[in-house]
Amino acid sequence: MDRYQDLRLLPDPEFPPSVLLNALFAKLHRVLVELPEGRPGISFPGYDAAQPTLGDQLRLHGSGHVLAVLADREWLRGMRDHLDIGTIAPVPATDRSVLVRRVQAKSNPERLRRRLMRRHGLSREAALVRQPTREGERLVLPWLEVRSTSTGQRFRLFVDQQVHPGPPTAGVFSPYGLSATASLPWF
């Protein structure tokens, strides 16, 4: 991950930044599904968990080759008028890294019971004992509205971004550009 590219949303009177960021992320997800190996990671320089917002910028992190392959795929078609697209540049020296991961809430007890029944062969009554009805977990994190390319379902993808001292940790990134273990340079 020696290169990066910034994609900054331009102000638009018709669309709020969240709508444009959702559209940009949807396009990115579709192209990352086609890259089974060497997927780039993403970070959000304007991330603010207190607001909560992802900001108006998405940063791609990867090798120069992978970022060039993405640029050749024309995945930004239809978004170019809404973006300031930075050049692919070397990552500056830094002593911090960022972990950008997906967080899933366990907020639907009925779904959790069905999962228990399916995975453990439990009866409905036994699943109800193990997963009682109660108020579900509510996440207060920035999120993106996503349509899964595999199932077609729409859902909220909650994003947790944490900056840590030290160098980035190598690893694999999902088709969303996120990882539970791999971190990226933070600058």
Image (tube, rainbow, N blue to C red):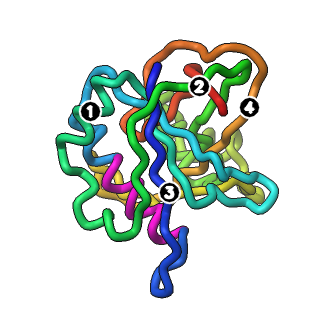
Q: Which mark is residue 137?
A: none
> For the point 46% across and 33% down, which residue is it?
4
Check if mark 4's residue and mark 3's residue have beta carbons within 8 Å: no
Residue range corresponding to the magenta coloring: 18-28
The residue indicated by pointer 3 is 8
Query: Where is residue 62 drawn, in percent x and y?
Result: 41, 26
* Amino acid residing under circle 2: Pro
Q: Secondary structure at mark 4?
A: strand
Circles 2 and 4: CB distance less than 8 Å?
no
Nearest to the observer: residue 90 or residue 26: 90
Q: Is residue 118 left or right of residue 92?
A: left
Q: The residue under label 1 is which amino acid type?
A: Ala
Q: Nearer the viewer, residue 95 or 75?
A: 95
Mark-to-mark CA distance, 2 and 4: 16 Å
Q: Nearer the viewer, mark 3 or mark 2?
A: 2
Verify whether residue 9 appears in magenta.
no
- Of callouts 2 and 4, which one flags the residue occurring earlier in the amino acid sequence? 2
Whole-percent x and y of residue 166? 73, 15
Q: Which mark is residue 68?
A: 1
Report which residue position mark 2 lands on: 92
Task: Find out whether the residues at labels 1 and 3 contact each other: C-beta distance under 8 Å.
Answer: no
Q: Position of residue 86 (x, y in %)?
A: 43, 47
Query: Badge 4 is on which residue?
Result: 163
Dot in front, 4 or 1 = 1
Q: Residue furthest right?
A: 50
Asked which secondary structure carries label 2, the reply is loop
* Amino acid type, mark 4: Val
Residues marked 4 and 1 touching at CB (< 8 Å):
no
Q: Is residue 186 above or below residue 24?
A: above
Residue placed furthest toward the bottom: 14
